[in-house]
Image (cartoon, grey):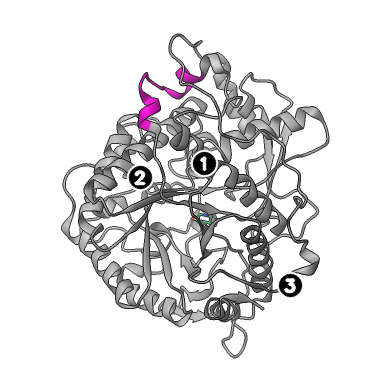
């Protein structure tokens, strides 16, 4: 099932168990909110330059052009050099969870071919590489000292990038929790936050001398909702109580990991990556508007507001039950806080939200969510193409993130064009998607959003989670049947020219 396939009522059904829950007792986490209320309108704001007059864009001098991958999606070598088992190593073995029964056991074999990846980045003239570190290479069971061979791998990758003049931008957690920690309760278990901070400290000590910018988490919204609420991602749990607690532990881990990295090396700059999307009511009804507002708080703002304010957006959960539902404790406000040095934003598409038929009493779960019901053209994975939403959400998030520099840490499209008779991969729709989104980005920059970099997802075709290898997001074609042969697609050449010229022509 697709990551966006929250089947109708899945949130409401999963949330049903909450009705049977205990009622709140004491201390609630304070909830003054920095999240804008639901005033989203999918239209130009005054002062923005209309699309019709922009068909080229020059980017600010020094703008960082890059590309992104994640450990489980590209590395392979799932059990080499002391690596432990992660929740994805386990999840892919469950029948029916992943298309075609695919796994990331080999993936793009980047663990052995990372030099090829660096060569690709160079060929594309990119200056920033966002990759993730596999926690289980560093701490095979999620605790204890660093595993030398795992640390050595990220040393080698970092040094190869630096030697090629490419900035390394690691993400500490891109969804691959050590299975041992899941067996001890996973993200719903508060202790996992401390384990994450230990891991962050190991990495900061090892690579903080060479890596300046770090991302803590990738898309906390997605891996908590799909991993613990709808169960379509690892670890495959469908438990609304566990889900809500997981969100709080992740936010605690975010704050604790932030401080652990800074303590390990005072020079590092720490940010995190949030996937964001305009939340549109499915109809003009008041009920749908309220549902969209609540769901947006649980998605766009649930993980970015707590570090910046020490509190959660109001109105997603019933205030009287919030502390109990999250498993929050007195003093957590301080643990949540993290004065981020920069903010990473991922954008792909928009989100439509309808009020659920069931009324469960948990606003953010009284909803149905759909990513593919609009009139817009779709990419091959079925997501609406909506570049205006990129502009809109950047303007909206900027209200929350303020002066902090923003990096686009992911944006891209799945198109499954195959090599033609000459071996070329003609994928004009990807170039068109990127072009339209880069123009929207340039308008947001012109209107004051401090964006300093852009990473196309993805450097190469890879393991697309529950979709297995059926969806190709790469700028580079990977032939999984022919020795991992990599061929830059037409869109990759187009993007390389954008990076070289620092402009979309
Ligand atoms: O492949 C994923 C990535 O791991 C996280 N962001 C979205 C991408 C496309 O689904």
Q: CA distance from mark 3 to mark 2?
A: 43 Å
Judge from the rendering whether residue 483 lies leftward or rightward of residue 17; answer left or right: left
Task: In this rendered view, identify the residue nearer to me: 369 or 298.
Answer: 298
Tag of residue 177:
2
Magenta span includes 327: yes
- Mark pair 2, 1: CA separation: 15 Å
Secondary structure under the numbered disc 1 in the rendered image:
helix
Q: Are dots 3 and 1 in contact, CB under 8 Å?
A: no
The percent coordinates of residue 181 (x first, y second) are 30, 38
Residue that label 3 marks: 55
Mark 3 and mark 2 lie on one chain; the one further toward the N terminus is: 3
> Does 154 lie within the magenta span?
no
Q: Which comes sooner in the sequence, label 2 or label 1? A: 2
Tell me where residue 283 appears, x and y as whole percent.
81, 37
> What predominant SS class does the magenta segment belong to?
helix
Q: Tell us which disc is closer to us: 3 or 2.
A: 3
Per the image, the residue denoted by label 1 is: 221
Q: How many marks?
A: 3
């Amino acid at each position: 099932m697709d990551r966006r396939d929250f089947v109708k009522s899945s949130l409401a059904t999963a949330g049903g168990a909450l009705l049977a829950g205990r009622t709140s007792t004491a201390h609630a986490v304070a909830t003054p909110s920095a999240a804008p209320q639901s005033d989203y309108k999918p239209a130009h704001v005054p002062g923005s330059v209309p699309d019709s007059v922009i068909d080229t864009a020059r980017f600010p001098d020094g703008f960082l052009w890059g590309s992104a991958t994640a450990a489980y999606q590209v590395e392979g070598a799932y059990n080499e050099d002391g690596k432990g088992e992660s929740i994805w190593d386990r999840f892919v073995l469950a029948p029916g969870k992943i298309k075609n029964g695919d796994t990331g056991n080999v993936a793009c074999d980047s663990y052995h071919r990372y030099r090829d990846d660096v060569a690709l980045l160079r060929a594309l003239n990119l200056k920033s590489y966002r990759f993730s570190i596999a926690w289980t290479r560093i701490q095979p069971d999620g605790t204890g000292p660093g595993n030398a061979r795992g640390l050595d791998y990220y040393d080698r990758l970092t040094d190869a990038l630096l030697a090629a003049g490419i900035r390394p931008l690691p993400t500490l957690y891109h969804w691959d929790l050590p299975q041992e920690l899941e067996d001890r309760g996973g993200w719903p278990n508060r202790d996992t936050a401390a384990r994450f901070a230990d891991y962050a400290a190991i990495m900061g000590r090892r690579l903080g001398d060479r890596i300046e910018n770090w991302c803590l988490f990738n898309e906390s919204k997605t891996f908590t909702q799909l991993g613990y609420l709808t169960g379509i991602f690892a670890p495959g749990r469908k438990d609304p109580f566990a889900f809500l607690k997981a969100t709080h532990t992740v936010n605690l881990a975010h704050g604790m990991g932030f401080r652990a990295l800074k303590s390990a090396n005072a020079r590092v700059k720490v940010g995190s990556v949030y996937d964001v999307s305009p939340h549109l009511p499915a109809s003009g009804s008041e009920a749908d508007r309220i549902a969209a507002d609540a769901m947006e708080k649980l998605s766009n703002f649930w993980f970015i507001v707590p570090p910046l304010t020490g509190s959660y957006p109001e109105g997603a959960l019933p205030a009287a039950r919030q502390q109990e539902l999250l498993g929050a404790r007195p003093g957590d406000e301080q643990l949540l806080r993290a004065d981020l040095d920069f903010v990473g934003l991922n954008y792909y598409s928009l989100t439509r939200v309808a009020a659920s038929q069931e009324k469960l009493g948990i606003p953010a779960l009284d909803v149905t969510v759909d990513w593919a019901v609009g009139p817009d053209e779709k990419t091959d994975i079925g997501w609406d193409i909506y570049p205006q939403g990129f502009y809109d959400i950047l303007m909206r998030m900027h209200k929350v993130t303020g002066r902090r520099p923003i990096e686009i840490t992911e944006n891209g499209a799945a198109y499954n064009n195959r090599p033609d008779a000459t071996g070329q991969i003609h994928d004009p729709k990807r170039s068109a998607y990127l072009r339209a989104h880069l123009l929207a980005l340039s308008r947001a920059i012109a209107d004051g959003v401090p964006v300093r970099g852009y990473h196309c997802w993805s450097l190469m075709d890879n393991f697309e989670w529950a979709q297995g290898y059926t969806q190709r997001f790469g700028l580079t074609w990977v032939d999984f049947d022919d020795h991992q042969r990599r061929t830059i697609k037409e869109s990759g050449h187009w993007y390389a020219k954008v990076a070289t010229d620092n402009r979309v022509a």
